[in-house]
Image: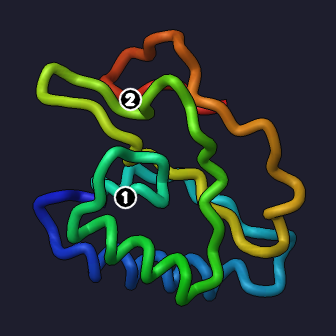
């Protein structure tokens, strides 16, 4: 979800993905939301974070992220939990033990298991 673009465009893309997977075995989305929300285990909530919260609630999607001593994103400019693991009701009971790894990746985003 490009921070330089209107987040509603990303929501429209997600709507298409949800529509395409309807009737399947379930939906899991891993996304860099470029948003901040205390609901997503971040220290603060910004405007994009409020929009993400509302969208997920309206679409009955679930964030599987759990509280962690590590943030999903960290760079010289800051750190946050903007990388989300999102599932629908068909998978919510099947995803467990979500964690953000301490090991550094080749980017400013940590590995999520």
Q: Nearer the viewer, residue 1 or 44?
A: 44
For label 1, count other residues whose C-alpha is less than 10 Å away and answer few (under 14), some (14-19) or many (20+): many
- Badge 1 marks a residue whose secondary structure is loop
- Badge 2 marks a residue whose secondary structure is loop
Q: Nearer the viewer, mark 1 or mark 2?
A: 1
The C terminus - image quarter: top right
x then y, percent, for residue 10:
34, 73
x then y, percent, for residue 78:
19, 30
Q: Is residue 1 left or right of residue 19?
A: left
- Name the residue at 82% across, 44% down: 96
Q: Which residue is mark 1?
A: 37
- Name the residue at 39% across, 49% down: 32
Is residue 23 positioned above or below 1 on the image? below
Asked whether disc 1 touches disc 2, contact meaning CB atoms under 8 Å apart, the reply is: no
x then y, percent, for residue 13:
41, 78
Q: Which residue is mark 2?
A: 109
What is the count of numbered marks?
2
For label 2, count other residues whose C-alpha is less than 10 Å away and answer few (under 14), some (14-19) or many (20+): many
- Residue 67's disc is none
Residue at the farthest top position: 103
* Marks 1/2: CA–CA distance: 17 Å
The N terminus - image quarter: bottom left
- Residue 105, quarter of the rendered image: top left
Is residue 103 positioned above or below 8 on the image? above
Q: Nearer the viewer, residue 73 or 20?
A: 73
Q: Nearer the viewer, residue 97 or 41?
A: 41
- Name the residue at 39% across, 46% down: 42
Look at the image and name its color scheme. rainbow
Which comes sooner in the sequence, label 1 or label 2? 1
Is residue 1 positioned above or below 79 on the image? below
């Amino acid at each position: 979800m490009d921070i330089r673009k209107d987040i509603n465009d990303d929501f429209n893309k997600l709507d298409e993905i949800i529509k395409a997977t309807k009737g399947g075995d379930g939906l899991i989305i891993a996304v860099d939301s470029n948003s901040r929300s205390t609901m997503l285990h971040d220290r603060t909530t910004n405007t994009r974070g409020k929009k993400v919260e509302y969208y997920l609630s309206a679409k009955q999607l679930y964030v599987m992220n759990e509280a962690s001593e590590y943030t999903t994103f960290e760079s010289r400019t800051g750190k946050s939990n903007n990388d989300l693991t999102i599932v629908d009701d068909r998978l919510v009971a099947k995803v467990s033990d979500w964690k953000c790894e301490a090991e550094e990746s080749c980017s400013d985003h940590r590995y999520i298991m």
